[in-house]
């Protein structure tokens, strides 16, 4: 990344506007720093990944495959199959230390297109429920690991099942969207 002279000019203008808007604070910031916590030169990791407490890395039940589960918010109704498409909010973290490695809001994907433990857990959920999955490495990434997930890592996910659709419903939605787009292109311009 390079900062041009124009970029420096914008930064200088922003700082002068800030000083004008908050003259008392600006004067204090130039003076000796206030007493507070010790200065740290530690570089924060990008992206910043929080740690999840040990109590939130445990599950109360196990399936026959070894997937741990805990219902955090119950719901009733139909459950997705591995062929369905799901819309979820989730947080993924390491069971060993609670380090968050992934999180997403309104993420859509095939319920069968993820790691085994996640897929199995999704198929236990009803729309609107929130569960915790404790996924042993054998149902996760195993000896391979991936990205920030080390080899043989047990994983934990908090998952909210926002919605799900069958493959036929998704295809119908796509066909209708294509039809609407074609009609919009053919419509006379006013």
Image (tube, rainbow, N blue to C red):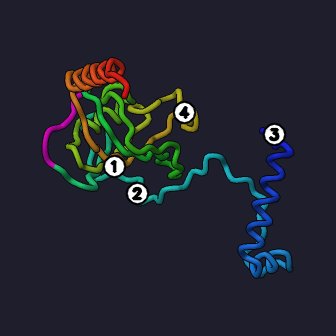
Sequence-first tag of 1 and 2? 2
- Give the residues drawn in magenta, as a range: 76-81
Task: Return the residue at label 3.
Answer: 2
- CA–CA distance in space, label 1 to label 2: 9 Å
Q: Residue 116: within the magenta?
A: no
Sequence-first tag of 1 and 3? 3
- CA–CA distance in space, label 1 to label 3: 43 Å
Sequence-first tag of 4 and 2? 2
Quadrant for the N terminus, please.
top right
Q: Which mark is residue 24?
A: none
- Asked if marks 1 and 2 touch (Cβ < 8 Å), the reply is yes
- Asked if marks 4 and 2 touch (Cβ < 8 Å), the reply is no
Task: Return the residue at label 1.
Answer: 132
Residue 156 % position (x, y): 41, 45
- Residue visible at 29% across and 47% down? 69
Nearest to viewer (mark 1 / mark 4): 1
Q: Residues within 10 Å of mark 2 (few under 14, many from 20)?
A: few
Sequence-first tag of 1 and 4? 1
Residue 70 % position (x, y): 29, 51
Task: Return the residue at label 2.
Answer: 56
Nearest to viewer (mark 4 / mark 3): 3
| Relative to 133, residue 181 above or below | above
- CA–CA distance in space, label 4 to label 3: 37 Å
Q: Residues within 10 Å of mark 3 (few under 14, many from 20)?
A: few
Task: Return the residue at label 4.
Answer: 151
Residue 74 % position (x, y): 20, 53
């Amino acid at each position: 990344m390079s900062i041009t002279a124009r970029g420096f000019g914008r930064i200088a203008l922003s700082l002068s506007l800030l000083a004008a808007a908050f003259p008392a604070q600006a004067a204090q910031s130039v003076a000796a720093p206030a007493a507070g916590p010790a200065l740290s030169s530690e570089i924060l990791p990008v992206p910043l990944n929080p740690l999840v407490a040990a109590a939130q890395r445990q599950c109360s039940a196990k399936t026959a495959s070894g997937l741990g589960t805990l219902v955090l918010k119950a719901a009733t109704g139909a459950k997705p199959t591995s062929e369905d498409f799901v819309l979820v909010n989730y947080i993924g973290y390491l069971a060993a230390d609670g380090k968050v490695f992934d999180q997403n809001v309104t993420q859509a994907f095939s319920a069968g297109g993820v790691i085994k433990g996640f897929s199995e857990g999704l198929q236990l959920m009803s729309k609107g429920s929130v569960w915790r999955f404790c996924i042993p490495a054998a149902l996760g990434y195993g000896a391979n690991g991936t990205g920030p997930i080390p080899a043989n890592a047990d994983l934990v996910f908090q998952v909210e099942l926002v919605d799900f659709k069958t493959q036929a419903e998704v295809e119908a939605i796509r066909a209708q969207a294509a039809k609407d787009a074609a009609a919009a292109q053919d419509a006379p311009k006013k």
